[in-house]
Image (tube, rainbow, N blue to C red):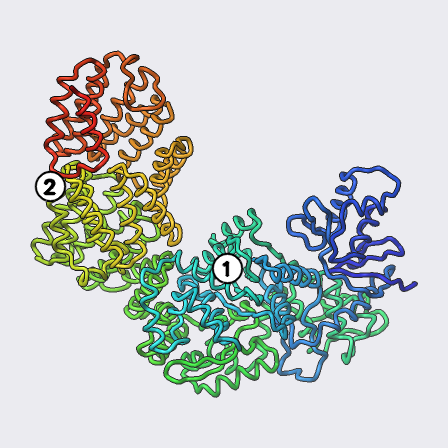
Amino acid sequence: MTALQTVSFGPFRLDAANARLWRDSEKIPLKPKTFSVLCYLVERAGQLVTKEELLKTLWPNVRVSDAVLKVCIREIREGLEDQAKAPQFIETVHRRGYRWVAAVQSSKFNVQSPEEVASSQQSIVSRQTETKDCGLGISSTPQAPSPKPRAPRLVGRDTELSRLHYLLGKAQTGERQIVFVTGEAGIGKTTVVEAFLEQLQGHADVHVCRGHCLEQFGEGEPYMPVLEALGQLCRAPDYDRILTTLGRYAPTWLAQMPGLLDTEALDALRPRIIGTTKERMLRELAEALEALTAEQTLVLQFEDLHWSDSATLDLISYVARRPQLARLFVIGTYRLSDVERREHPLKPLKQDLHVHRYCEELAIAPLSEAAVTAYVTIRLAAPSSFPQSGLQRLAQMIHQHTEGNPLFMVSLVDYVASRETPIDKNENWNFRPAIEYLDIPVSLRAFIEQQIDQVSENTQQILQAASIVGREFSAAAVAAGRQENLDAVETVCEELVRQSLFLQRRGTEEWPDGTIAARYRFLHVLHQNVLAERLTARQRITQHQRIGGRLEGAYGIRVREIAAELALRFEEGRDYNRALQHRWQAGRNATRRHAHQEAILHFTRALDLLTHLPDNQERKQQELGLRIILGGSLVTAKGHAAPEVEAVYAEARALCQEVGETPQLFPALAGLYRHYTVRGKYDIALKLGNQLLELAQNAQEPTLLMGAHGMLGYVLFLRGDFATAQKHLEQSVALYDVQRHRSIAALYGDDPGVASLAFAAWTLWLRGYPDQALQRNNAALLLAHEVAHPHVHTTASGLAAQFYRFRREEQAVRERVDDVLTLAKEYGFPLWIAVGTLFYGWTLTEHGQVEAGIAQIREGLTALRAIGSESERTQYLGMLAQAYSKAGQPQAGLALLDEALTLVDNTGERFWEAELYRVKGNLVLQSSVQCPTSETPSPQHLAPSTQAEACFLKAIEVARQQEAKLLELRATMSLVRLWQCQGKPHAARIALAEIYHRFTEGFDTVDLREAKELLSTLT
């Protein structure tokens, strides 16, 4: 056969002279013009080839449309099994043309003979043999230590490596890249990624750091792989610059890595991380990564994301969606079957990112027969006694037996190379089923069992002990589990590493007590799993207990740093008391990192552990404490209105009744109070508020009294009992001491002093004391500034925005709304995002942008309902009804008011009832004359309206019952305007003068100025 010059890319060979495209030994049929397009693109690899250039060059003097070219491109992609959305070969440059993106190599192949083609592939594979081992479980056996050709690290993965390098190139231009590398166990995901990362060594402008997700305790340990990667990054040669950047942009993350800072630096850092939230942590690290990648490219590899915690996935999602430039390349590996089987949150995350083109997926497929042939050729051609003529047949059999699984292939080739086989190596060897003569297990698991049996009994026991420590482990932990000398364990592990059996080195580890030990990693998780299954239940329990005890002693006062691992050790070791202690601490660790989903997992697991302890008073007390702290995490993660919140606090209250007198009853009832208040169930909330006050009075504890008065005052305000609400709110304010109580904000995110002052301002305004109300409002804002907590600041601004809306001071509302939305979006407070959106819509309507304002108010209402918040809904519906009035749609407004008044009757939320009737009266009048602009009826068009007058009189009646003097003034002004139109100026003057002269302050406010002006017209 004639050797022809060809080019190769991935598993394909392009023979331009003979107009043929090959995949291994398979010919890919292409039409002549389609083949010409392929050749043209390949010859210009990496360059943009415009549509005009292709049409002009390949269709000269012929007028054709773009559709012809698109058909050719589609046929090429079908032949190469390429995808337009995730191209490995041909990239579409929108509206311009196409670019060949795969790496192209020039080689010589015999394109007629598949056997000769496979043999000649050795020249390609040999260029990839400089690195140590294949990372796919390559092993030799102690019985066959003789020299052998070094195994190639990779075969058949050119396409995948080319794609990774292409994506890296895009990242280096500032276009951040997220790629998920997926495949089944043993398929070579890690090997491909490690080979790619090794090719980056020596590049001064590329930083590489890695984090691993661990199966046994990674799920509940928030940000574990991220913190591991950051720790590596902070040990880079330019660590000073990195630490400075983290200190500037991500102080909350530095606080999670105390080993990087001295005591003085940590003390200086603490004030800067007050008020940290999960959203702040995500934003901080995203901004730090952008700053770090301003001049250098950063590659972050996260391995085994199918074991990842939710917090790490949230970070990947957040980083992927940011539009800012960043030379950032994130690579995550995962096993698809594990994600599907466990319904892991990675699945919906990846799907969503992929739909929005924020990520790519690189699926690692089984090796082709040609790749297996190339591997077998290098491994067995020399110096073994296998004849060259038989290797092709042997490779075919190995490919059939392993179905292209690299781990199984490597293990099987090692097995073949180490045995003396009874194969008759004569000229007919090529045609005999060689593998049938070998005693080879039919599955990879059985094959690994056979490999294990070939090492000594002591080595097996050490490997078994290591298997329950984790995929990656410290020799010191294994020594503890085995009660064996550390040097002896490391000697065995080093020998296994030297022989490429089961393990690879992963550096060293130092424990706080000074223990320094080598770290190792199983070459593959299947090795770990098979070894772990060999331990008896008693062996597992004993070794977990020993490892846990040794780690407790080694970490001493720093033991909380490894709480999640210790919880696992003692849980597996059946020491449930210690497991419970560490599981609780792991939940607290997660809470400090604002990873509340992980905290919920830990606290819930701790409750499960309690079932293993004796059912006595001590256990009930422990369960009660766990349910209270679990309630806090549930509130943060799901909101006060979540049914899970109601359930956990209800269970806590029931436990309190079993336990008897206990201080835990107050937080249990407080949790239920907040739940029912947010849900709009004020009757239940009022009963709970009275119970809370009774408990606080019995205990005579100022902090409890302060909280109880504040909670009771708010629910009484919502029910329209303003005078009683005022008394309770003022008592709460009087009991508040900023020095003693400011820590409440750090624990719960709210400050009772700020809330009581703000609600007292609302109540005073409604009762007709605008100046005193303004003083209380300003005091709330000043106190929030002193407390210096983001959620408290946001709450104070939100309540102030509502106060200024009551006063109809649009500019002040806008200023506070800007503050609310900025903080709420930065720190992730969904309630205040919704409320801020509502108020922003109101300011738009006041500026004449009525349609836009209505849209914003509706958006806010929808968002509130989505998080289960029904509190104060009646006033928000009234706000929207007034916006429809300004839009000239009174019927739409009346429908909303009917809904709001139904809520008043159903829920007892009456603080805005008088205003709802007043607005309804105005809309009735507007509807009767179709006046599109004003609440004031036109005297030349309006006929007397009994219905409107009844609404105004009802509003006045409700306001008087509630002692809401300012709402009574508003309703009276609306009635007076109606009477003016009806020719009743005398009655109108008497009514307005009576209410106006009852005011003693606030004459510069909008309502009182309008009342004075209206009174002057009534002669």
Decide which of 870, 483 is in the foreground and name it: 870
Decide which of 406, 2 is in the foreground and name it: 2
The quadrant holding residue 701 is bottom left
Give the amino acid at mark 1: His
Q: Position of residue 590 (x, y in %)?
A: 36, 63
Q: Residue at x 32, y 68 (%)?
A: 270
Decide which of 347, 237 is in the foreground and name it: 237
Give the amino acid at mark 2: Thr
Q: Position of residue 841 (x, y in %)?
A: 37, 37
Which comes before the other along the chain, label 1 or label 2?
A: 1
SS label for mark 2: helix
Tag 2 residue: 724
SS label for mark 1: helix
Tag 1 residue: 306
Q: Is residue 650 left or right of residue 731?
A: right
Mark 1: give few (<14), some (14-19) or many (20+) Cα within 10 Å. many
Q: Quick check: 470 above or below 827?
A: below
The quadrant holding residue 89 is bottom right
Cα–Cα gap, marks 1 and 2: 56 Å
Q: Quick check: 593 above or below 878?
A: below
Decide which of 573, 891 is in the foreground and name it: 891
Confirm or deny contact between disc 1 and disc 2 (CB under 8 A): no
Q: Is residue 658 left or right of residue 889?
A: left
Residue 443 shows in this picture: no
Residue 286 shows in this picture: yes
Q: Position of residue 266 (x, y in %)?
A: 35, 73
